[in-house]
Image (spheres, helix red, strand yellow):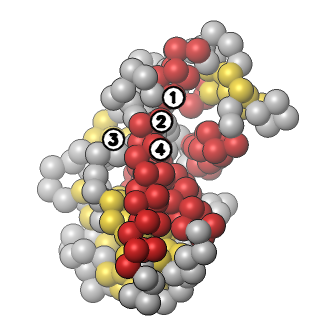
Amino acid sequence: MACEFELALPDSLPPVHASTVAEEAFEVVRECEARWSRFRSDSYLAFLEREAPRRAVVLDADAFAIFEVALRVWRESQGAFDVAWRSAGGSSAAIALDRGARTIRFHAPLALDLGALAKGHALDLAREHLAHAGIERALLHGGTSSVAALGGGWKVALAGSARVLELADECLSLSGQRGRAHVVDPRTRNPVERGGLAWVRAPSGLLAEAWSTAALVLGYVPDSAAITDHGFEDEEHERT
């Protein structure tokens, strides 16, 4: 994830309590980053890359949810979102999930990159922790491009745009590029030439992150996507 996370809590919360729950939420984020980092040989992601090509690996509920969303969006976006795009000749087509046994198996060696998906998941887990701690209203963001709202009345302005979105118990993700193309189309392994910004509001950070990435590649979001809203901010004009 390699980005800064911030948390906004109501002023009415006692400072000591606010400090405690904030540190607990950030610890949830740190644990998630360590688990899903592609840069650490001791991460759970690295473990799956080693073991899943050899055998079916039992996943916990959180890990299964990540791959379930990743595969769903991969299918619905026709490959425009793919956590296995870094694999040499491989793709998410090689990932098999068994819902009944809650296992994952790779039918080819894969190099995975959860990227923003892991960031969205970290925000989901942190938001869930805050809710369990009795917090009714909070706003978290990771790297300013991923936002999770607990409670309502949160207004978020999109950088470089006049658009302001109001969030209530939902997440927002932005994917964009301006100037040099750096976003890769997983289907071709070539840079996406489209500039500007794609944004998605969804019930979870997982869905918001996956679909904002796919939207930037595709230029649209299919009707089947389980999101709340989306839009595009171009360098020269706006479209929704």
Discs 2, 1 touching: Cβ within 8 Å: yes
Q: Secondary structure at mark 2?
A: helix
Check disc 4 and report the residue beneath it.
32
| Of callouts 1 and 3, the N-terminal one | 1
Residue 165 is situated, as x and y percent measured from the top left of the image, at 42, 83
Going by the numbered disc 1, the residue's amino acid type is Tyr
Check disc 1 and report the residue beneath it.
44
The residue lying furthest to the right in this view is: 100
Which disc number belongs to residue 184? Answer: 3
- Which residue sits at x=45%, y=28%? 43
Q: Is residue 91 above or below residue 216?
A: above
Q: Nearer the viewer, residue 61 or 100?
A: 61
Going by the numbered disc 3, the residue's amino acid type is Val
Q: Nearer the viewer, residue 209 or 138?
A: 138
- Which residue sits at x=28%, y=70%? 234
Residue 62 is situated, as x and y percent measured from the top left of the image, at 64, 44
Check disc 2 and report the residue beneath it.
35
Q: Label 2 vs label 4: CA separation? A: 5 Å
How many labels, in total?
Answer: 4
Going by the numbered disc 4, the residue's amino acid type is Cys
Say which quarter of the image contains residue 179.
bottom left
| Of callouts 4 and 1, the N-terminal one | 4
Which disc number belongs to residue 83? Answer: none
The residue lying furthest to the left in this view is: 179
Q: Is residue 191 above or below residue 179?
A: above
Q: Secondary structure at mark 3?
A: strand
| Of callouts 4 and 3, the N-terminal one | 4
Discs 4, 3 touching: Cβ within 8 Å: no
Q: Label 2 vs label 3: CA separation? A: 24 Å
Q: Is residue 184 above or below residue 212?
A: above
| Of callouts 2 and 1, the N-terminal one | 2
